[in-house]
Amino acid sequence: MSLNHLAEASGRPRPARRSLSRYRAASALAAAAFALAACGGGTDGGTDTAADGGEDAAAGYPEQDITFVVPFSAGGPTDTVTRLIAEPMAAELGASIIVQNVEGAGGTIAAGQVAGAEADGYTVLMHHIGMSTAPALYANLPYEPLEDFKPVGLVTEVPMTIIARKDFEPETLEELVTYLKANADDVTLANAGVGAASQLCGLLLQEAVGVKLTEVPYKGTGPALTDLVGGQVDLMCDQTTNTTGQIKGDEVKAYAVTTPERVESLPDLPTTEEAGLPELQVGVWHGLYVPADTPDAVVEKLTAALQKALEDDNVVSQLAELGAAPSSQEDATPEAHREQLASQIELWAPIIKDAGVVVQ
Ligand code: ASP
């Protein structure tokens, strides 16, 4: 089932969109996220004062170190992707990029911090699909994703995997479903907090199976994976950028990848569709953001550096090894990114509302 089918099935209006990649949206419950609206431009066309008057400020940019804020723990998947692109972006921009992990509250603390930061291009947020789910998950979110930021461009698309501690009883996804139905009260599900991709995927898993598990929030799935390997928690959904090594090293049990197609770097891992849970499909898109008043000329420089980084051989090969793909040049733009964010907010809001998850 495609995103459009999902919209039809749920009676929601069907947003026009163009495909981002091989990861197709598909779920009766939720759906993968790699699709963009077909038309319409960004809304940040120089209407704000700083953007109009920021040319002078932007002329010499960058003149100091740039901070990339990662909303989750060091060593996790968001951190990995950020550090991977930071190096070629720094080379392109001619400035150092410092990666800062601002953890907590499923990524919303970092996003709130960057929303309120100086709009000078020296504070940049890396965030993922969570930017689009947080407005529905939080009753009092301290920022507005479409208003308080300027998107710089999409960065990458990453499948998720459903994994468990190595000695967890079920051997296949089918057995996992049966096991969860019989033992829901005893199973712990790790995530990176409300607003994280792992939380969204875990929510979809619980909805698909029809169970409520005990969720264990971490500040990132880096530490969550450590606990999973150590046997302190049972189950987790997480990006291949974090789980590929442990799956290949046989340190965890892997049930499925949550995209319609298998991942080349994990060829033996079935898709959720193949493994009997076709309604559970989700993929994680990432993007860079700056505060809303950042001059357009600064954003242009960041976008150009991002585009260059996404063509860097090392970035491309490392992402491929981790089951991910760099965004296309067309998608690594503020316009495409804004379209993606808007369409994803629209997609997830009713699904999250139906699931009844709201942080007050
Ligand atoms: N992958 C995590 C998530 O669930 C966050 C992280 O640690 O990067 O969103």
Image: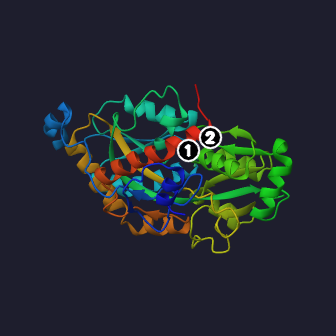
Q: Residue lying furthest front in this view?
A: 11
Residue 315 percent across, percent down from the top left: 44, 64
Structural crowding at the residue carrying mark 2, measured as other residues with C-alpha within 10 Å and reported as few (<14), some (14–19) or many (≥20): some
The image shows residue 275, relative to residue 229, as above or below, that is below
Residue 18 percent across, percent down from the top left: 37, 62
Amino acid at pointer 2: Ala
- Can residue 94 be seen? no
Task: Count every numbered label the image shows and give the total.
Answer: 2
Q: Nearer the viewer, residue 160 or 312?
A: 160
Mark 1 and mark 2 in contact (Cβ < 8 Å)?
Answer: yes
Structural crowding at the residue carrying mark 1, measured as other residues with C-alpha within 10 Å and reported as few (<14), some (14–19) or many (≥20): some
Q: Residue at x 47, y 54 (%)?
A: 285
As drawn, is 129 to the left or to the right of 228?
left
Residue 5 percent across, percent down from the top left: 50, 60
**Disc 1 target residue:** 351
As drawn, is 56 to the left or to the right of 165?
left
**Disc 2 target residue:** 355
Q: Secondary structure at mark 2?
A: helix
